[in-house]
Amino acid sequence: MQDLPLLLGHRGARATQSVRENTLASFELALQHGCQGFEFDVRLTADGQAVICHDDRYAGLEVARSSYLELQKAGNREQGIAEGDKTQEGCGLAMLDEVLAGFSKRVFLDIELKVPGLELRTLEALREHQPERGAVVSSFLPEVLLEMKCRSARAEVGLICERAEQLAFWPRLPVEYVIPHVKLASQELIKRLHAAGKRCLVWTVNDAATMQKLGEWGVDGIISDETKLLVQTFAGW
């Protein structure tokens, strides 16, 4: 039997509809389910803040054209969160520094940069809150990964791939991780990556049979919406 792969929540505990994805509350829930870390998405606001958000719009506003405060207020209104409501802590728009401050000493972090321009801010945040359980700065954008490496050769970066042509590009990039979509994953790919000294995280894996198969193939980590199922699948390993 292979070593246990890293069990990572996708945007936290994404399948749990009662908690909004990509929030501090969702990240905590993934850990409560037994995950060893999580993946999350970072975007840049108009006033230069690194916020945790997957889509280019948040609560009806374009992230890149809105300030953090505008986005925060719009999100709170959308969710019915009143100012000062302690019962809703961790459910609103989070910032990168908040996530690293709260989790960098506890779990593995997959920090996905959705847009260019976040590289220096991310490195500064990682220096201030140094991950003790490991971290990768990942992106679909090769230019983001190259910029990270130009600014810090020690930064561990990962190429995210959803299509075969993206996956074919990994040998030309100075990455430590390759992060293919589950439809691209194969035993041969994992062997090839390991032979090249790379680590492989696969996303988004939401059924037990595929989780088990990837574990048997020796994948380094599995990213899943179904955090409870992910942990249950590997409970006997």
Image (cartoon, rainbow, N blue to C red):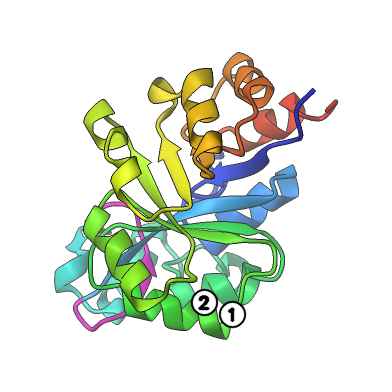
- Which secondary structure dominates the residues rendered in magenta? loop
User: Dots 2 and 1: beta carbons under 8 Å?
Assistant: yes
The image shows residue 126 at horizontal and vertical percentages of 51, 76
Q: Residue furthest front?
A: 195
Magenta segment: 46-58
Whether residue 74 appears in this view of the structure is no
What number is the disc on residue 129? 1
Q: Residue furthest top?
A: 209
Q: Is residue 40 left or right of residue 133?
A: left
Judge whether 170 appears above or below 129 on screen. Answer: above
Amino acid on which disc 2 is placed: Leu
What number is the disc on residue 126? 2
Give the secondary structure at mark 2.
helix
The image shows residue 83 at horizontal and vertical percentages of 46, 79
Q: Nearer the viewer, residue 33 or 85?
A: 33
Give the secondary structure at mark 1.
loop
